[in-house]
Amino acid sequence: MWNRPRFDLKVRLTLRVAAISAACFAAISAYFLITADRAAHARIDSIAGIVAKSLELQQGKTQWVAAPRADFPNLDPVAAYVMTPGLCLAVRGTSGDMLQRFCSGVPPATPPPQAFTAFYRSLFDPGREAARPVVVRGAKLGDAVVWLDPAVQTAEAWHEAGRLMLALAIALPLLCVLVYAALARALRPTHMIRTGLERVAAGDLTARLPPFDLAELSAIRDVFNHLAESLDTALAERNELTRKLIALQDEERRHLARELHDEFGQSLAAIRALASSARQTAAQDCPALLGECDGIARTATGMMETLRGALFRLRPPDVEELGLVASLEGLVAGWNGRSRGEPRFAIRFDGTFETPPATISANLYRIVQEALTNAAKHAGATKVSLELTMRPEEIALAIDDDGRSADPAGKSGMGLLGMRERVAALRGRLSFEPGPNGGSALRVVIPLAAADRPVLEHAA
């Protein structure tokens, strides 16, 4: 609804400058046309006054000579001095008849376009007469009339406007090029601002902008750098809080594992011992109770196996001693062992994992552990593939399954959230999306530089 075509700022400003320049040229052209029209009317008014004075002198001379001449009015003497192309001189009697008329009809070499002729004649009045009375001894003999041929006046106006239009045709493109080049140079730092924003959006909060020459861009630079520093500080504080929370969670897991092992495990061992003792007694005194005793022993044994699995999940093997590869292979083997002989989990390693950072190794183990639990128990996956890739600057984890394509956080409580928090604390990236062939696809990328930060060193 609100999508409108977007123009480049330089193009938009250049077009506006071009429009303003064209309006200025149009105003200048109109000013020149108005000035030329006024000058033409002033000239014919002046010529009309000269013709009237000349006719009055001619009439005055006839009264002083012995034999008056009958060639009044005579426009030839004055025409020789004032005539220009397109100028017309005439004497109009008191009755309105033209007594004499003289025109210098020189047609224009190049007639103006009809559109300009119609436009010019709609604004001005070419061919308007200028009349001055011829008065001798208080008696009006007629009027001296002067006008310009409308075609000649329009052609002269077109000649003047044509020069301005030619200047506009040359100057306007040149002005647009110069304005665009100046704007491109002035707005060149906006590319740096955009690059900085893209880096911040990608999670690189170390991005900073250099000083700029323009005051407006310098203000944007100060706000940007302050925002990046504030975000970096806030993220560091958040990561520290996440580290403490995860460390507290893992400590609680270890405490719970000790409690289960010491208390519940001992109780199950005692139940098995009592069941064995009761079976020996029942074998001698009451053989009918042997089945119940064996059932108690089997139940206690099953509970012991379940307890061992829970203890393994609560307190995994020491990744730092066994190594990340061996720990993950053991984890996958444990899940395959629960599948009653049918392998459901496959893992593949790409790269050298001899000395991965301990912090990353421990948390990757926890992430894989949580992901496998989500895929097997909550997504109902029958096939799960893991791939761990060691690169020069990062470690990439890819987990694909064929289970239900749904957000595991909805069914596994804080599972996905916990993985996100661990990855965020390591300054990594996590994505969880539906797989291309069904199921789900988990992608985790952790930079090795995260190991240099004091983050999650006590977690897992």
Image (tube, rainbow, N blue to C red):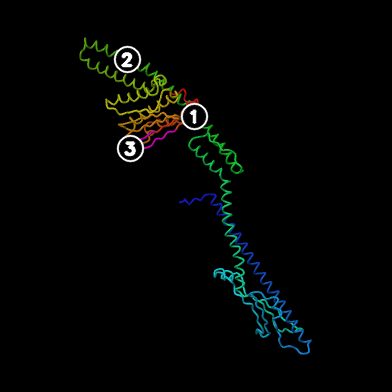
Front residue of 100/212: it is: 100
Front residue of 361/81: it is: 81
Q: Earlier in the sequence, mark 3 or mark 1?
A: 1
User: For the residue marked with disc 1, what is the amino acid?
Assistant: Asn
Find the magenta span and give its range. Answer: 429-442
Q: Position of residue 425 (x, y in %)?
A: 47, 29
For residue 438, the mark is 3
**Residue at which label 2 appears:** 269
The reply to whether the magenta stretch includes residue 145 is no
Real-space CA distance between mark 3 and mark 2, rounded to the nearest whole angstrom: 45 Å
User: For the residue marked with disc 2, what is the amino acid?
Assistant: Ala
| Circle 2 crowding by C-alpha within 10 Å: few under 14, some 14–19, many from 20 | some
Front disc: 3 or 2: 3
Front disc: 2 or 1: 1
The reply to whether the magenta stretch includes residue 438 is yes
**Residue at which label 1 appears:** 239
Front residue of 49/276: it is: 49
- Check if mark 3's residue and mark 1's residue have beta carbons within 8 Å: no
User: For the residue marked with disc 3, what is the amino acid?
Assistant: Gly
